[in-house]
Amino acid sequence: MKKITLFFVAVLFSVTIQAQTTLTHNTDDIITSTNSVACQGGDNLQARVFILGDFGITGDFEISEGALGVQSISADVNLTVNIYEVDDLFPAGFPGSATLLGSQVVTVPFGSDLTIVDYTFDTPVLVPAGTERILVEVSQELDGISWFIGGTAAQTDHPWLASVQCEVLEYLAPADIGFPDAHYYINVTGEEVLSVGDNLADVVSIFPVPAKDVLNVKVPSSIEISEVTLHDLLGRNTGAIFSNGAINVSDLSRGVYMLTVKTTEGTLTQKVVKK
């Protein structure tokens, strides 16, 4: 990305790289007693497919946390959450056409009916930049445990299910087997991170430009800022102080200044305008 475009992109881009992003199709966090379907006794695959562009994700995305809804459960159950990269032909060709990016074993305790169980990935799952779709799959073995994943009353896209035991041999939408109201609560949370080879100017957000009173400097949480200075075009330090992600420029004269941002990933120097 050219520096000249950074001013316009920064405000939009900083929304996703500065804070965690939750991938979800559920419109609320209330687990109901009706919005689920499962095969009794185990052998369940329940999943959601997320298009990363729908959530404003374009770079490397590191998934660190997840959440599962619980409708009902007859005993403690160990589930495996798998994160796959899939193509736009899914479910055709799955799993052969998919790439497993990471997994996490999650224990859902007995007595957690109608709740949401949060969990953390022991090893965060890195979804490489350029990935269009991921499948978040919740897998239960044939263990004899009655496990019904929770759902919400409304959703923005349908989930997927499969079970060899119940003769659903490949992933289908619940509506395809007569359960259109199965709205599985399967969410994951992560953030975009700066990867090797990324241009620092592409992920540092400096806004507004031109600035009148305050100039904001934002970076991804994976980067630490060590120093921010603002000089005039003669190289003189203006003395403007960087605090809580911003510089107060209200007392500066109108004109062009040089902003230097030193970080753990390198140093960025850029022209800014005070109006």
Image (cartoon, grey):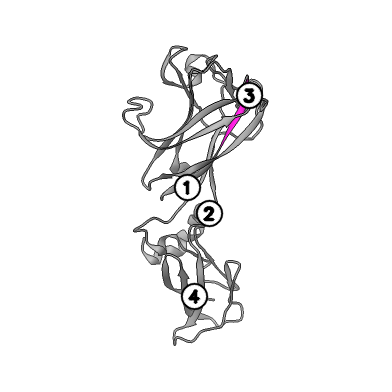
Crowding at dot 3, Cα within 10 Å, few <14 / some 14-19 / many 20+, comes out as many
In the rendered structure, the answer to whether residue 33 lies left or right of residue 51 reads right
**Rounded to the nearest whole Å, what is the CA distance between mark 4 and mark 3?**
55 Å
Which numbered circle lies on residue 106?
none
The mark nearer the N terminus, 1 or 3, is 1
The answer to which quarter of the image holds residue 250 is bottom right
The mark nearer the N terminus, 4 or 1, is 1
In the rendered structure, the answer to whether residue 212 lies left or right of residue 13 reads right
Q: Is residue 170 above or below residue 2?
A: above
Helix, strand or loop for the magenta stretch, by majority: strand
Which numbered circle lies on residue 56?
1
Which numbered circle lies on residue 71?
3
Quadrant for the N terminus, please: bottom left
**Rounded to the nearest whole Å, what is the CA distance between mark 1 and mark 2?**
9 Å
Q: Amino acid at mark 2?
A: Val
In front: mark 1 or mark 3? Answer: 3
Q: Is residue 72 magenta?
A: yes
**Rounded to the nearest whole Å, what is the CA distance between mark 3 and mark 2?**
33 Å
- Residue on which the image places disc 4: 273
Q: Is residue 222 above or below residue 186?
A: below
In front: mark 4 or mark 3? Answer: 3
Residue at the (35%, 27%) spot, across then down? 95
Q: Is residue 229 above or below residue 62?
A: below
In the rendered structure, the answer to whether residue 156 lies left or right of residue 29 reads left
The mark nearer the N terminus, 3 or 2, is 2
Q: Secondary structure at mark 2?
A: helix
- Residue on which the image places disc 2: 15
The mark nearer the N terminus, 4 or 3, is 3
Q: Is residue 206 magenta?
A: no
